[in-house]
Amino acid sequence: MDYLRNKYDIIVVGAGHAGCEAAISCARLGAKVLLATLDVDHIALMPCNPAIGGPAKSTLVREIDALGGVMGEAADATYIQMKMLNSSKGPAVRALRAQSDKKQYMDYMRNIIENNPNIYLRQACITDLLVNEGQVTGAVDEYGIEYSARAIILTTGTSLNGKIFVGLKSYSAGRLGEKAAYGLSESLIRNGINIKKLKTGTPPRVDKRTIDYSKMSIQPGDESLHFYSFKPNRPVRPQYPCYLTRTNEQTHEIIKANLDKSPMYQGLIQGVGPRYCPSIEDKVVRFSENPSHHIFIEPEGLGTYEVYIQGFSSSLPADVQIKMLRTLPGLEKAHVIKPAYAVEYDYVPAVQTTHSLMSKNIKGLFFAGQINGTSGYEEAAAQGLIAGINAFSYLNNSEMLELSRSSSYIGTLIDDLVTKDIQDPYRMLTSRSEYRLLLRQDNADARLTPIGRKYGLIDDSQFKVFTDKQAAIEKELSRIKEAKISATDEVNSLLSRYGEHMERGMKIAELLKRPNIDYNVIKEIDANTKELNIPFDVFEQVEILVKYDGYLKRQEFQVEQASKLDKFKIPDDIDYSSIEHISSETRDKLSKIRPKTLAQASRIGGVKPADISILMVMLERHAYSRV
């Protein structure tokens, strides 16, 4: 029994969303995994927003599920509200969002971990890495206990040298109520890994019994449910509302009058904060023309009175926060359970890793989650899953999983991290993908389930669900391309309700292309379609493929054109300093990131098209490999 000798295949450091996906994927593939965490009662904790999904993030969750991860399954099992955002817009920007029961989500994930015989859970602070000749061999905890492993995945979140700020007061912590992790940053530095600092924050929590919801706008869930996991028979649970209130002039005046008490504005925090999730004081200062800002009141779970004040992140003093909150309609008598705070922490810029998320300097060492400079549970979980798959592949000398930008949002996320030298906490946005019409949340299974199957995380039953669905889509597409609807008076009478009219009979697919016509209308006017009772997930795909056929083909052509640069492979040992006719800035960036292909080189900030042309000529002249 190797675990009695502290000998494992893989060590995962941290049990947040990245760590859970990493440990579970490695264990399901057959590796013996030590999962080390600062607090075993905080596994899969949602220290910020108690929710999963939203714009772009929902696509990440569906992709995680399609590859064989667990976040979507856990979100489906523990939601207290499901809502499809942007439902009136095109499929590329629709986004599912689940308000989760925070405690139930943690319990669900811990149950998966504790019921996997390949995962050995340990409450420990890892303080040092053991490295021999550029290869990781193990780790050491705060008590001096050594653990051996041939691969280690670091998923430390905001714990590394974390410092919390509430006003001008600060103390060591990775998150409120949890100690910081010390020693590991210094170990990374000793081993040649560059460390920088970032900052994030979270809003206060308030006792819901002190809130007057009658002064707020109710935000209910959807009547027609959608789910994250592609597995069948997802649970139908009661839904609970969120609420909307707003800041006002009085709120803004209090904030402006107390900026001298903000650690950010006093220069006490050196780390860069998230650009797309600013604190309330940042919003008021940066968007001074806005008379108010939306604030969402969201329940943390069914077994607690705590509610989350979405949009009210702050690092101002606790007494100032109370004054600010009590200016909001409905929160005039609010009792604060936990104050908002900012946290500054160490991270490892991901340009030091490959697309597999393995360190370029230390073999067998992988990084995933906020340690790579990202924000968000979904971004972390996606990286954790990829790092887990690749750590197992590394142990077995098998092919690493490196997803392309054209295959997935996960591929886009990782490519941005390892290529673009991100300077602030990275958040996945639909605008970050040049192929977002192809990379929708609804078709994540079609894109990635075969890959999950290849790497061993999709079992026979789930793969059968997938293949049956794809066959049903193909069958229905073929049917509607041949089946006709006649232009009868009865049909046109029904169509007139939707502002449509048929001059002649036409095939169903042709009619379905019209903007005002969807599958529900087709079922209304065509008895055969109604009798077939096509499942929603099938007719949704058919409808999108028909309606957006021209746009999809255009984007597929863009992918084909972009892939031409991917065919130019750049040798690992290339000496950029010897290349003439490109700027010294470009040489420095290429030497730092060491892109694998011309396509990746073209995405590096500051590298000009002329530089790419010179590189292409050089690669062809020296007959470097093209595949």
Image (cartoon, rainbow, N blue to C red):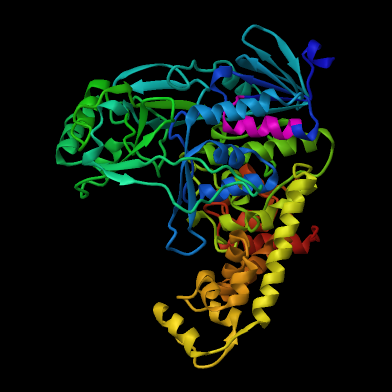
| Majority secondary structure of magenta residues | helix
Residue 507 position in % (x across, y down): 61, 84
Residues in magenta? 14-27
Q: Is residue 294 above or below residue 568?
A: above
In which quarter of the view is residue 86 placed?
bottom left
Check the image and name the residue furthest to the bottom.
503
Can the viewer see residue 359?
A: yes
Please identify the quadrant where the C terminus is shown. Answer: bottom right
- Foreground pick, 623 / 228: 228
- Foreground pick, 344 / 22: 22
Q: Is residue 168 left or right of residue 75?
A: left
- Foreground pick, 326 / 5: 326
Q: Is residue 349 above or below residue 129?
A: below
Residue 451 position in % (x across, y down): 74, 50
* Circle count: 0
Residue 151 position in % (x across, y down): 75, 28
Q: Is residue 216 left or right of residue 60?
A: left
Residue 575 position in % (x across, y down): 71, 47
- Foreground pick, 498 / 356: 498
Q: Is residue 349 above or below residue 110?
A: below
Q: Is residue 1 left or right of residue 412?
A: right
Is 127 contained in the magenta span? no
Can the viewer see residue 571?
A: no
Is 17 contained in the magenta span? yes
Please identify the quadrant where the N terminus is shown. Answer: top right
Write the residue at 51% across / 43% down.
422
Write the residue at 59% across / 71% down.
530
Write the residue at 42% across / 31% down.
300
